């Protein structure tokens, strides 16, 4: 312990013990300091002691390096985590808003459908046809037996969108 990190502690203990001995024996001496000098390990263990000291210094250097790395990387990782959480919250809110809008639109359509079912049915059919027809090139009308009743070639260059009304 004298050769490593407890030298100061040992010096203080020796000072206290030595002053106590002087006081008990009534010497009238005040010990003001104890200083251990030239503390060296015995020659038989000197090489091993130096190895241990070197290993402790290496350990301290590695711990300091690890703390530096942690201080470098941890704030970045925390920031990335916060960004991911914020992005997820934004996505969640966007999906909630989208679903709320779709539900509101559905409710509005359902209310109108209840008021005038035949008009709303026709309107929904026309909306569907105007969305689907521009994407097809040929239209086949088939009867209940699977026979083609009518063939309508739709020209994609023709800007007119044909509207097919259901037969009732």
Image (tube, rainbow, N blue to C red):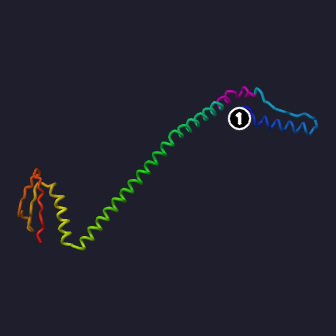
Q: Who is closer to the viewer here, 31 or 14?
A: 31
Is 7 situated left or right of 168 in this image? right
Task: Measuring from the top left, give residue 148's x and y in whole percent.
Answer: 6, 62
Q: Tell me: residue 107, above or below residue 64.
A: below
Mark 1 burial class by Cα count in 10 Å: few <14, some 14-19, many 20+: few
**Would residue 44 be counted in the magenta stretch?**
yes
**Would residue 16 be counted in the magenta stretch?**
no
Q: Who is closer to the viewer here, 113 or 140?
A: 113
Q: Quadrant of the C terminus?
A: bottom left
Q: Quadrant of residue 121?
A: bottom left
Q: Quadrant of the N terminus?
A: top right
Is 28 situated left or right of 97 in this image? right
Q: Quadrant of residue 65?
A: top right
Q: Who is closer to the viewer here, 25 or 41?
A: 25
Number of residue marks: 1
Q: Quadrant of residue 66?
A: top right
Q: Image point 24% across, 71% down: which residue?
A: 113
Q: Tell me: residue 120, above or below residue 35.
A: below
Task: Measuring from the top left, give residue 42's x and y in whole percent.
Answer: 74, 27
Q: Image point 6% across, 64% down: which residue?
A: 147
Q: Tell me: residue 80, above or below residue 99.
A: above
Task: Measuring from the top left, give residue 24's x and y in whole percent.
Answer: 92, 40
Magenta span of residues: 39-51
Is 47 situated left or right of 150 in this image? right
Q: Tell me: residue 97, above or below residue 42.
A: below
Task: Measuring from the top left, give residue 25's x and y in whole percent.
Answer: 93, 38
Q: Image point 9% across, 60% down: which residue?
A: 140
- Assign a secondary structure to mark 1: loop
Residue of label 1: 5
């Amino acid at each position: 312990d004298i050769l490593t990190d407890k030298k100061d502690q040992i010096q203080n203990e020796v000072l206290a013990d030595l002053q106590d001995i002087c006081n008990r024996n009534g010497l009238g001496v005040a010990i003001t300091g104890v200083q251990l000098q030239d503390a060296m390990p015995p020659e038989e263990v000197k090489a091993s002691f130096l190895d241990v000291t070197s290993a402790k210094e290496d350990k301290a250097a590695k711990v300091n390096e690890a703390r530096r790395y942690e201080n470098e990387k941890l704030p970045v990782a925390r920031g990335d985590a916060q960004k991911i959480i914020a992005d997820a919250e934004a996505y969640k809110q966007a999906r909630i808003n989208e679903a709320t809008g779709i539900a509101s639109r559905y409710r509005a359509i359902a209310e109108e459908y209840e008021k005038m079912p035949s008009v709303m049915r026709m309107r929904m059919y026309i909306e569907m046809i105007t969305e689907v027809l521009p994407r097809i090139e040929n239209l086949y009308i088939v009867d209940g037996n699977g026979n083609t009743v009518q063939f309508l070639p739709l020209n994609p260059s023709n800007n007119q969108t044909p509207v097919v009304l259901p037969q009732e």
